[in-house]
Amino acid sequence: MTLTLIRIPSLALLCALALGAHADDDTAGRAPLLPAYVQECGACHVAYPPRLLPASSWQRLMGNLKSHFGSDASVDAATTQQLTTWLTANAGSGKRAEATRDDRITSSAWFVREHREARHWFGTAKVKTAADCAACHTKAAEGSYREREIRLPR
Amino acid sequence: MTTHPTPVLTLLAAALLVLAVPAGAATPAELLAGYSASAGAPALAARGQAFFQSRHGGEWSCASCHGALPTGPGRHAATGKAIEPLAPAAHARRFSDAAKAEKWFRRNCNDVLGRECSAAEKADVLAWLNTLKP
């Protein structure tokens, strides 16, 4: 009984991982967010899914937290190491994780294309920047970006 | 000979350091006492308010993200992310951890002033925050 209960979610997880690269609902293959990542990085911005940048971008960003897009986001050496390890281990590959010129997720061709219909909101009082995912993606804080969770601001 | 501090002075310095940055859980009043001791002068809440709300010649003030009266939620000036109230009376976890308070002072003072804040400046700001009621 116990064994069966354990095996069902495992199978589901395997399927989700296998489908991850092709899934359309932006949920499959998603790594649970590391609590330290949510605490440290998620204090100033949404804890962006690590798969949206390649490992090389995460390495550059984590190597220069003292000057992080205009802010000092530095953390102690042990935390930096812990976060870098987790981010690079869960980094993306392929079209959704192309290296961008400035290591911003919002600069990727994928992001720009997906947000064609939303871009007029960016820079407004309701959606300060394109990086303010939670302005429309109601479950962004949990790392979920399903289409049905989107609520455009009024 | 004078280059070597006496054991008494060393102990005193160590005691002051412990006072300034107590490890682990703390209260806002304890943190304020530590910063005031390091500064060697009593904190002034009015000076803290002026410091908090000034741009110091730069682009941002503390208030840019935390709000001019941080008993309510703030909003990150760059990312737009909601920030929970900073005043301890409005948010129980604020200034309850010395290391955390130090981390945020270091980062945010760098963002606002382009340098770290002095113990006296931290004491003033915390003294003002401690006077705020939601």
Image: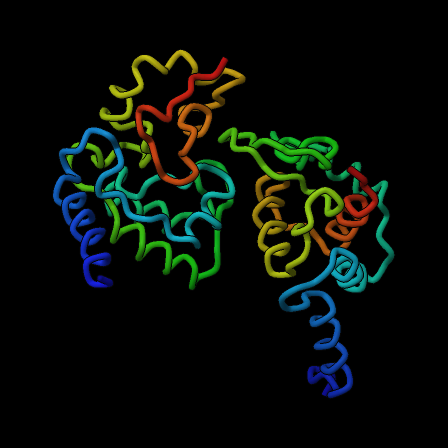
x, y (%) of residue B14? 70, 77
Task: Name the residue at the front extreme.
Answer: A1
Left/right placement of residue A49 relative to residue A153 reads left
Residue B6 coordinates in the image, percent (x, y): 75, 87
Q: Quadrant of the N terminus of chain B?
A: bottom right
| Number of numbered discs on residues | 0
Q: Is residue B46 depicted above or below A153 in this figure? A: below
Q: Residue at x 75, y 59 (%)?
A: B35
Residue found at x 14% / y 45%: A15
Image location (x, y in percent) of residue B4 = 69, 85
| Residue at 51%, 18% in the rendered image | A126
Towards the viewer: B39 or B89: B89
Residue in the image at 62% along x and 39% along y = B84
Left-right relation of A9 to B20:
left
Q: How is the image coloured?
A: rainbow
Which of the 4 quarters of the picture holds residue A50?
top left
Residue B48 in the figure: left or right of residue A17: right
Instruction: Determine which quarter of the picture holds residue B55.
Output: top right
| Image position of A63 with respect to B37: above or below | above
Q: Is residue A84 left or right of residue B26?
A: left
* Image position, residue B13 (x, y; %): 73, 76
Q: Nearer the viewer, residue B9 or A36?
A: A36
Quadrant the C terminus of chain B occupies: top right
